Amino acid sequence: MRLFQRRALAALVSFVLLALLGAGGYVIVEGVPYDEALFMTVITLTAVGYEEVFPLSAAGRSYTAVVLVLGISWMGVWFAFITAFLVELDLTHVLRSRRMTRTIDELENHVIVCGVGRTGTEVVRELEHSNAPWVVIEQNADHVERLRKEQPDALVIEGDATRDSELEAAGIHRARGLVACLSQDTDNLFVCLSARDLNPDLSIVARASQEETRDKLFRAGATHVVSPEISGGIRMASMLLRPTVMSFLEVATRSSDHALRIEQIEVREGDRVVGVTLEEAHIPRETGLIVIALRRGGESGDFTFNPGSDTRIEPGDELVVLGERDQVDRLRDYLSG
């Protein structure tokens, strides 16, 4: 865009100079007032074809021919510039789309966010803050433009998230999760149905505006359903009843000014802590993290809060830990050996 502005300014300046110099030539050759000479120059440069403003001598006609050639040449350059600009715009869009497609095709274990309204924007910010790869599917051009202003390198597919083709373009077969936060519950219902059919192992979080649609979303394949009204009400009451606890959770889960985080780490087959107790794993000593809970069997299992030191770690367990970001990264490295 800046190059276009510079070129447009150069074209405008060149036309003004041609008009001023051309008018000066008419004043010298024909001895006419400058305003008449300027008007004659402008209609000649633009090849409008009006009648002569004043009678022309033989020298004046020759001079007019020169001005006319210069005007036609300038118009040719101007139209070529406009054409090049339009081609560049289209080419830039094509190249950006191809580059984005290649990047998405290389993604694995990413999150697909369907809709970037107010809820989706917060989801994207949290994913970006957690350094989790993500792809957005959004149909509203205004929402896409707003997201790209905030995230210039955002991977955005402009299309209808309820269509299988858009979900496949977002790499749903390789994704770890999907967030359905479109404005209409019916659209989120279709997204859940399509996503679950395309990837049976996908973790799906859906937004429900109305309480009666929660069960339908679960039946459609949603793993978790979030209702902003219910969550907001519980949060508001908790802020009154347990303000210190809520402030701590705010810092540990959302604040970008603190490194403290609550994270979950899955223990995989072959990790160095498999088969040993929490005491033998030495997680606090090796990483500085605090293990505040353990869930056996993954998402379908039950939580054990403040697990004892004799708790034995098994493959598939999820450790809920509290600490700083670099400590969480250290734990991942420690588990893999």
Image (tube, rainbow, N blue to C red):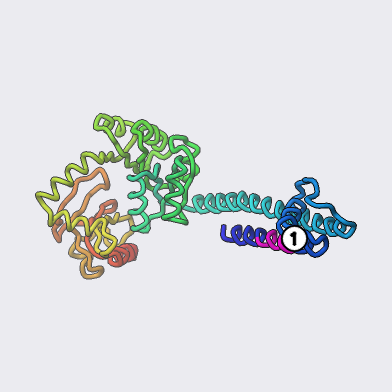
State the image coordinates of residue 93 (x, y, percent, origin top left). Answer: 57, 50
Residues 107 and 179: in front is: 179
Left or right: 263, with 32 as reference point:
left
What residue is shown with label 1? 23
Q: Residues within 10 Å of mark 1 (few under 14, many from 20)?
A: many
Q: Residue at x 34, y 63 (%)?
A: 336
Image coords of residue 115 (percent x, y): 39, 42
Point out the residue furthest to the bottom here: 285
Of 38 and 244, nearer the camera is: 38
Could you tell me which quadrant the N terminus lies in?
A: bottom right
> In x, y percent, where is residue 252?
22, 59
Question: Magenta region: which residues?
Answer: 13-21
Q: Quadrant of the C terminus?
A: bottom left
| Dominant secondary structure of the residues highlighted in magenta in the image | helix
Q: Residue at x 76, y 53 (%)?
A: 40
Q: Is residue 15 magenta?
A: yes
Callout 1: SS: helix
Residue at 18% across, 46% down? 235
Identify which amino acid the numbered label 1 is placed on: Ala
